[in-house]
Image (spheres, grey):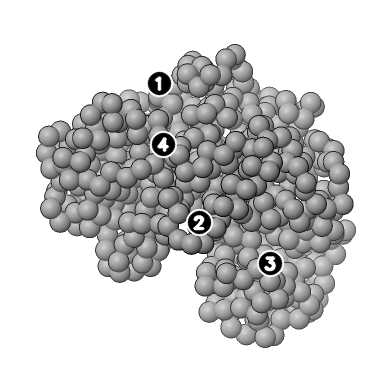
């Protein structure tokens, strides 16, 4: 499980170019992920690898194809200094877990990486980095595999139950 | 410690006190879908096991991006949504009424203290009435259609206090472009922006709509103007009686407090290819423009068209510039028609189209060829937004657009 390092302001067009929006299959989208931005990604990525981003990761369009492409590549965690709001929601909704890590810029590319969501830290090589806690409610959606499987098993939602972030 | 208006709206909906940073499952008072994002939202609703929508009365369904259907794919999307509306007993405004955000407000479907979601990023415009309104993706909307609720992270708030009186032919669009420049394209991400101060207290509802509409261009989740007499008067005109009074406490905790003064603010123009690249009009005056577009959810209301007409007078547009004018809704179109504005625009040489998103959608019509330049009263000037990725889009107010259309180049409306 290695890291794939990206910079600031990675937009949804960089994650999945617009010409592939006609596809909805996560595996097809994954085969074009980061095409033109980082061409070794689609072939080299393995299930469980971790994306490392800088500031404002996922900015731009509200298209859900971007997190779907990463989920299709077997990515579970995206770690970044900060996320664009709609990408953050869309990621959780398709079963990815976006993790805010203020020190993400210091994480090297290609490092062996383990994420421990319960202990709020990630370990890359010899170093550990703190991550901000994920609200329990979002964890439950991501654990279910996204909002669609989460909602399929629900008849009603408990209004206004939430969790402190 | 007091609460912000946003914290109060969520607390009121939840029945207990909630604060910025908390994640809550909150009920929504309304949900809007249109012809671009609606089909996927409906598909997700069914994939979530949805059978009947949570409340047909609270769903606003219409077509505005590709109307009348401009392709076979658009026509098929319209048919799919018409059938859904019929089966679910949802009122379908179809292609008749105009741009989604204008129609939601005109039909009285958003009001003070309410939580409204829309599958379109400019849903934040309804904050002009004191609603908490935000744009969401299609999976979120599928969830809303089934449950009538959605999880929200209650946002922190940036307070933008504005003072001063606008110069002649300077207005809300110039103000919001200057605020976007100051806050930046991601400066309000995850946050709400509360617009207040004497300039907003005296600003008519149409100007408040323009400002709240563009909150998303700073990454904000919502933009709001606390309700006051202007709000209540508008709500009454939309058939909504009663007064929901809600405002931030004086000791509320804000993420930031910003102050602006419009007294000396010149007309603003956002240059390609980002909304936060606002410049004083003088810095870009003389730039040739191939197409001028006056319209959109940001600036397609009657008052915007009246501002443009006032600048134009009896003059005609420059021969080498195409001018497209599109009222935001049927109501706004009628007002422009009854007051003679449409006739004046046509005589000046404009193409006046039926209410819809128009060139702002960047796919239906009014596209730009490589190398062409558009000056537009809409909300986004991203690369490729109005056609070719090698075209350029500048953003401005209706007055600046009208003045520029007279001369075929970016022109200061105070000087014509």
How far apart are the alpha carbons under marks 4 and 2?
Answer: 21 Å
Q: Comparing marks 4 and 2, which lies closer to the viewer?
A: 2
Q: Which residue is mark 2?
A: B75
- Mark 1 and mark 4 in contact? Answer it, CB < 8 Å: no
Q: Which picture quadrant has residue B348?
A: top left
Q: Residues within 10 Å of mark 4 (few under 14, many from 20)?
A: many
Residue B76 horizontal side relative to residue B201, left or right: right
Q: Is residue B304 above or below residue A115?
A: above
**Whole-percent x, y for residue B78 in the image:** 54, 52
The answer to whether residue B288 shows anywhere in this view is: yes
**Whole-percent x, y for residue A25 in the image:** 68, 71
Residue at image point 62% right, 85% down: A40
- The tag on residue A68 is 3
Residue at image point 21% right, 39% down: B345
Q: Which chain hosts label 4? A: B
Q: Nearer the viewer, residue B358 or B413?
A: B358
Q: Which residue is mark 1?
A: B202
Residue B294 horizontal side relative to residue B285, left or right: right
Callout 4 and callout 3 share a chain: no
Q: Comparing marks 1 and 4, which lies closer to the viewer?
A: 4
Callout 1 and callout 4 share a chain: yes
Residue at image point 56% right, 52% down: B79
How far apart are the alpha carbons under marks 4 and 3?
Answer: 36 Å
- The tag on residue B114 is none
Say what secondary structure mark 4 lies in. loop
- Mark 4 and mark 3 in contact? Answer it, CB < 8 Å: no
Q: Comparing marks 4 and 3, which lies closer to the viewer?
A: 4
Callout 1 and callout 2 share a chain: yes
Say what secondary structure mark 1 lies in. loop
User: Which of pointers 4 and 2 lies earlier in the amino acid sequence?
Assistant: 2
Say what secondary structure mark 2 lies in. helix
């Amino acid at each position: 499980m290695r890291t794939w390092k990206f910079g600031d302001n990675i937009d949804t067009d960089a994650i999945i170019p617009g010409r592939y929006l006609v596809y909805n299959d996560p595996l097809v989208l994954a085969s074009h992920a980061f095409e033109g931005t980082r061409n070794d990604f689609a072939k080299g990525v393995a299930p469980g690898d971790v994306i490392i981003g800088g500031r404002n990761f996922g900015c731009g369009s509200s298209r859900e194809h971007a997190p779907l492409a990463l989920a299709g590549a077997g990515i579970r965690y995206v770690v970044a200094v900060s996320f664009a709001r709609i990408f953050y929601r869309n990621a959780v909704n398709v079963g990815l877990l976006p993790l805010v890590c203020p020190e993400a810029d210091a994480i090297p590319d290609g490092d062996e990486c383990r994420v421990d969501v319960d202990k709020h830290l990630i370990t890359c090589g010899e170093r550990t980095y703190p991550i901000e806690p994920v609200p329990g409610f979002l964890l439950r959606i991501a654990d279910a595999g996204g909002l669609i499987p989460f909602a399929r098993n629900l008849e009603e939602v408990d209004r206004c139950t939430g969790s402190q972030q | 410690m007091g609460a912000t208006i946003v914290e109060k709206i969520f607390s009121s909906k939840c029945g207990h006190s909630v604060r910025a940073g908390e994640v809550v499952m909150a009920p929504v008072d309304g949900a809007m879908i249109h012809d671009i994002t609606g089909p996927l939202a409906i598909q997700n609703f069914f994939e979530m096991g949805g059978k009947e929508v949570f409340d047909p009365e609270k769903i606003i369904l219409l077509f505005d991006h590709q109307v009348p259907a401009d392709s076979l794919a658009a026509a098929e999307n319209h048919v799919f949504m018409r059938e859904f509306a019929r089966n679910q007993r949802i009122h379908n405004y179809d292609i008749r009424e105009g741009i989604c955000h204008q129609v939601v407000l005109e039909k009285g479907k958003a009001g003070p203290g309410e939580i409204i979601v829309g599958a379109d990023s400019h849903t934040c415009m309804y904050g002009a009435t004191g609603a908490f309104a935000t744009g969401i993706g299609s999976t979120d909307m599928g969830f809303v259609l089934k449950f009538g609720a959605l999880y929200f992270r209650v946002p922190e708030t940036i307070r933008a206090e504005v003072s001063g009186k606008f110069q002649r032919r300077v207005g809300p669009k110039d103000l919001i472009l200057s605020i976007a420049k100051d806050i930046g394209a991601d400066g309000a991400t995850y946050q709400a922006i509360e617009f207040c101060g004497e300039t907003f207290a005296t600003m008519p509802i149409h100007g408040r709509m323009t400002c709240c509409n563009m909150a998303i261009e700073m990454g904000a989740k919502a933009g709001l103007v606390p309700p006051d007499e202007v709000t209540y008067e508008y709500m009454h005109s939309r058939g909504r009686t009663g007064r929901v009074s809600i405002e931030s406490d004086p000791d509320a905790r804000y993420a930031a407090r910003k102050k602006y003064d419009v007294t000396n603010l010149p007309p603003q123009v956002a240059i390609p290819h980002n909304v936060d690249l606002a410049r004083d009009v003088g810095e870009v005056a003389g730039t040739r423009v191939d197409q001028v577009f006056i319209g959109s959810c940001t600036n397609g209301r009657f008052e915007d068209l009246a501002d443009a007409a006032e600048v134009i007078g009896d003059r005609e547009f420059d021969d080498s510039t195409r001018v497209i004018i599109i009222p935001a809704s049927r109501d706004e179109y009628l007002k422009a028609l009854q007051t003679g504005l449409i006739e004046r625009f046509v005589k000046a040489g404009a193409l006046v189209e039926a209410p819809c998103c128009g060139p702002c959608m960047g796919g239906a019509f009014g596209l730009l060829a490589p190398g062409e330049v558009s000056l537009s009263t809409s909300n986004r000037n991203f690369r490729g937004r109005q056609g070719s990725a090698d075209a350029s889009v500048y953003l401005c107010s209706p007055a600046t657009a009208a003045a520029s259309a007279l001369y075929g180049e970016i022109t200061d409306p105070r000087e014509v």
